[in-house]
């Protein structure tokens, strides 16, 4: 159960869910340097909720999640897949969107539900509102390795979201600069190699005579088409493409 400072909680859809011992330090810092078991449990749940939000979007796009972990520095969702830039930006939003859902639910409970009846309930409400909102703001800062570094690129990537299937993902290259350079080069190459639409072959007469044979005009049109296809294939082979 324990290994390398981690406590394994179990698996979900093949992904290992685990806690690092440093999560205790993170809870103490965010809790104002007080030892509160309720705040500790709630903080761990909040960090795991954030990482599960990432995982849900990863699974939504058909990629693989290997580890969901909570640490004193927040947490990490380890995943792999052939993701497009738009998908990576959407995955970066997954964590804060999960937190936003909790935030909306907590404010709704405060507005329309019964007031907290104990100190533990007040602690959980504070965690789900003020602490949660503060963590959302920090995560959305556009500074690596925070989520905002990729999340805010979603607007630019929205315009190029149709270029799906290109090799662009966390598995290919950890350098975002080299990833973007590869992607821009692929877009320019795809524009230069835009395929030509197929030529229309029009045969106005009935292509088959009463005896079931092709008439001369239809046969000649088909032969011309096959000759053009063979010629283009020969040119591409000579060019090495």
Image (cartoon, helix red, strand yellow):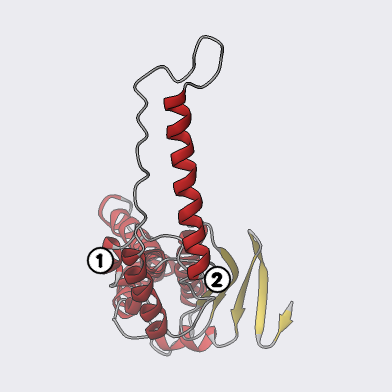
Relative to the observer, which residue lies in front, 192 or 162?
A: 192
Q: Residues within 10 Å of mark 1 (few under 14, many from 20)?
A: few
Relative to the observer, which residue lies in front, 7 or 206?
A: 206
On residue 155, which mark appears?
A: 1
Relative to the observer, which residue lies in front, 96 or 197?
A: 197
Q: Secondary structure at mark 1?
A: helix
Of pointers 2 and 1, the one earlier in the residue sequence:
2
Q: Position of residue 12 (x, y in %)?
A: 63, 61
Relative to the observer, which residue lies in front, 166 or 44?
A: 166
On residue 79, which mark appears?
A: 2
Q: Going 33% across and 74% down the picture, which residue do you hit?
A: 184
- The outermost residue toward the top is 210
Q: Position of residue 137 (x, y in %)?
A: 28, 76
Q: Quadrant of residue 155?
A: bottom left
Q: Going 48% across and 72% down the picture, which residue do you hit?
A: 169
Q: Going 45% across and 71% down the picture, which residue do you hit?
A: 168
Up/down of 197 relative to 191, above or below: above
Q: Position of residue 86 (x, y in %)?
A: 36, 65
Q: Going 40% across and 82% down the picture, which residue do you hit?
A: 176
| Residue 31 seen in render | no
Up/down of 177 relative to 166, above or below: below
Q: Secondary structure at mark 2?
A: strand
Q: Position of residue 215 (x, y in %)?
A: 47, 21
* Residues marked 2 and 1 touching at CB (< 8 Å): no
Cα gap from disc 2 to disc 1, whole angstroms: 23 Å
């Amino acid at each position: 159960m324990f290994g390398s400072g981690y406590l394994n909680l179990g698996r979900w859809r093949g992904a290992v869910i685990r806690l690092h011992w440093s999560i205790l330090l993170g809870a103490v810092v965010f809790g104002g340097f007080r030892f509160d078991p309720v705040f500790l449990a709630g903080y761990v749940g909040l960090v795991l909720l954030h990482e599960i939000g990432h995982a849900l979007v990863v699974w939504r796009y058909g990629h693989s999640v290997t580890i969901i972990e909570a640490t004193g520095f927040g947490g990490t969702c380890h995943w792999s897949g052939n993701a497009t830039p738009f998908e990576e930006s959407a995955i970066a939003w997954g964590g804060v969107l999960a937190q936003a859902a909790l935030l909306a639910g907590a404010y709704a409970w405060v507005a329309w539900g019964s007031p907290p009846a104990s100190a533990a309930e007040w602690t959980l409400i504070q965690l789900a509102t003020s602490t949660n909102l503060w963590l959302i703001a920090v995560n959305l800062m556009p500074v690596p390795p925070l989520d905002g570094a990729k999340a805010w690129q979603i607007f630019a990537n929205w315009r190029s979201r149709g270029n799906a299937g290109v090799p662009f993902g966390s598995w290919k290259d950890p350098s975002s600069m080299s990833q973007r350079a590869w992607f821009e080069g692929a877009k320019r190459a795809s524009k230069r190699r835009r395929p030509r639409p197929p030529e229309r072959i029009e045969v106005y007469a009935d292509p088959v005579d009463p005896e079931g044979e092709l008439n001369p005009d239809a046969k000649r049109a088909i032969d011309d088409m096959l000759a053009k296809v063979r010629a283009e294939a020969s040119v591409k082979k000579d060019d090495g493409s």
